[in-house]
Image (spheres, helix red, strand yellow):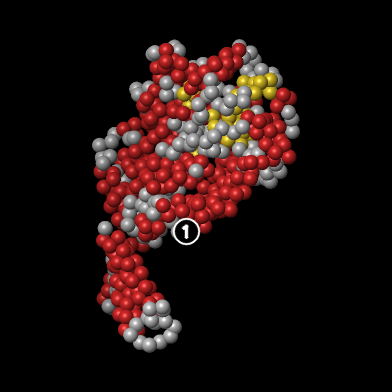
Amino acid sequence: MTNNEKNNIENEQVVETAKAVENEQPVETAKAVENEQVVETAKAVENEKPAQTEKPAEKEKKKIDKENLKQEIDKIKAENKGDRKEMSSQMKELLKNEIKDYRKQERTRGAEMLSIFAAHNYYANGFTPEELRSTLEDLGPTYVKIGQIMSSRVDLLPEAYCTELEKLRQNVKPLDPEVAKAVIEQETGKKIDELYQEFRDEPLGSASMGQVHYAVLKDGTPVVTKVQRPLIADMMREDYKILKKLAGLVNVVTDTDDEDQMIDLVSVIEELEKVTEEELDFRIEAKNTKFFKENCIEDENKISCPTVYDELTTERIFTMSYVEGYTVSHKDKIIEDGYDPLKIGQAVAENFVHQVLDVGYFHADPHQGNIMLSKGKPYWIDFGMIGHVSDKDINTIQNMIMAMLSGDAQELVNGITSLGATSTKTNRDKLIEDAQVFLDKYSGTKGISDINMSDLIDEITELAAAHHITLPGQFTMLGRSLLAIEGVLEQLCPELDLFKLLSDKLVERNKEQFDIKEVLLNVGKDILSTGKKIGKLPGYLADTLQGLSKGKMKINMEITGYEEPLDRIGVYIKYVVLSLIACVLFIGSCLLASVDIEPKTSNGMPLLAVIGIVFSIALAIYSIGKLSKKKK
């Protein structure tokens, strides 16, 4: 490793901490000397007494019953909804120019957004993934942040859009350090000197929603404090109001011609607004971090996450322990420092499997930038999004895997319909046929370890979507998280098999849930039920023959599989009829033009005839355009 590479990694150790609270593009640090000072400060306290760690018995008391975890998280979110504090006079003075610009922009923002939408031809064919990304970049930093939130919501947008939105980057001006200090002082009611032994003016990272500063508490503990931009909440709320008004005019282009599969952008924006409101309240992210530390970390000697400092955490500031180190993407640095990549990867993989299968809550964005290495120990960071899977969901997925191994298409379909919501267009017989074709791909599979879990989830999602079954967002979120963690391990320790760990855990769960008494009891019930039905068979047969001999037998037939073609024909007919109406209206308007009636235009033509001609041409263009689009 060259000296330049070493210097780059040392500088990155400072900047990476910013990703602990907001995984966005960090700003460049002003001076290399300042970066070295931060590292030296952290080393100076390395041998001091660290933040208090809980004893196993104390930690066990804080464990929440698994069945109540979801309710506890929802309760936390509900409790944190509150009115924002009024801006102090000091803050208003510091931000008087920004407030003036914001008020001015507020009056013209709607027209500005509409002009940007028009420049990207949203009214023509809707937004493709590339056009949506470039439009958000043109709209400014606020919308780049919205796009970054959207990129992780595979439950709201198609995969192609999420992948494209991941390319969004922010270029925002850092917040004035005096303003950042004023926010902290207003939120805590104390002066900076009363809270910190040291507070660095130069931010470690800056983004559209806030920025992160390195500090040292009075007891010598190094921390990072995330500070929210004072006007960002009002700006984002106003922008969402405008977006919802414009969303009704915009379509999102999908890979299918089926109009029913078009994305409801209004619903997507309303859901994103809820997510943004949660991100604007830093207490929710703090609660997520504490919850994760208390419930998802089994052994802090192997893997951990930052400690939250409640006394310095409010709606607009968030303080947690500083993690000195670098991301697990630096494999060469890991080896050079004398650490074993396989051991680190094993800790990460085992903990992730524990999160999913034991706790039911998992880190929903586990890419390389969100896993730091400090003194040989990996740390999870950035808990803006946590996924959830219930015991029932895990059992259903487990049963689907067993159905695959046994080639049982019927049981696989039962699992898919149990997980998702079917529609009136779902044809179960056709679904079973396609499921059988899907199973043929895995006909040579001998065990769970032979199945790639992330690919399996993607394929099941595609199969469900093809049959108009909507799977829950958490299911696709789990697939995306598995893919991300697989990528981390592939780079860090390719010899480690994540899916072998998953399969071993699933087998262990299956053994734990297997109850021979219950199985025998269910078999006995089935045999008894079948015996009763067989006993009634002669009577049913006699009734059938008697009805047949008297001519009372009726046979009902149902033809399935033609609903979609008939619907398409209906759509064609609708636009053909509209085209004919346009032709008749055009001819009638032309004839009306020769009649002498008032009112008239400046050139002497009847106004009614002119309106008829213009409307008929517009209707014809619309109808022909729709027909040509359907043919494609």
What residue is rendered at 58% in x and 53% in y?
Answer: 107
Q: Position of residue 356 (x, y in %)?
A: 47, 35
What residue is rendered at 32% in x and 64% in y?
Answer: 626
Instruction: Give the camera-side residue of 64 and 578.
Output: 578
Residue occupying the far bottom of the picture: 596
Q: Position of residue 203 (x, y in %)?
A: 57, 27
Q: Please state if 147 lies on the left or on the right of 53 as rendered.
A: left
What residue is rendered at 51% in x and 55% in y?
Answer: 111
Quarter of the rendering containing residue 500: top left
Q: Position of residue 342 (x, y in %)?
A: 40, 19
Asked if residue 463 shows in the view, the reply is yes
Asked if residue 538 shows in the view, the reply is no
* Quadrant including the N terminus: top left
Pointer 1 residue: 248
Instruction: Give the camera-side residue of 50 and 622.
Output: 622
Q: Position of residue 513 (x, y in %)?
A: 46, 37
Residue 370, above or below 556:
above
Residue 317, above or below 37:
below
Residue 156, above or below 205:
below
Residue type at numbered disc 1: Gly
Residue 114, above or below 506:
below
Instruction: Give the camera-side residue of 382 and 625.
Output: 625
Q: Which secondary structure, mark 1?
A: loop
Q: Please state if 219 lies on the left or on the right of 537 as rendered.
A: right
What residue is rendered at 58% in x and 29% in y?
Answer: 212
Q: Please state if 508 lies on the left or on the right of 310 as rendered.
A: left
Quarter of the rendering containing residue 444: top left
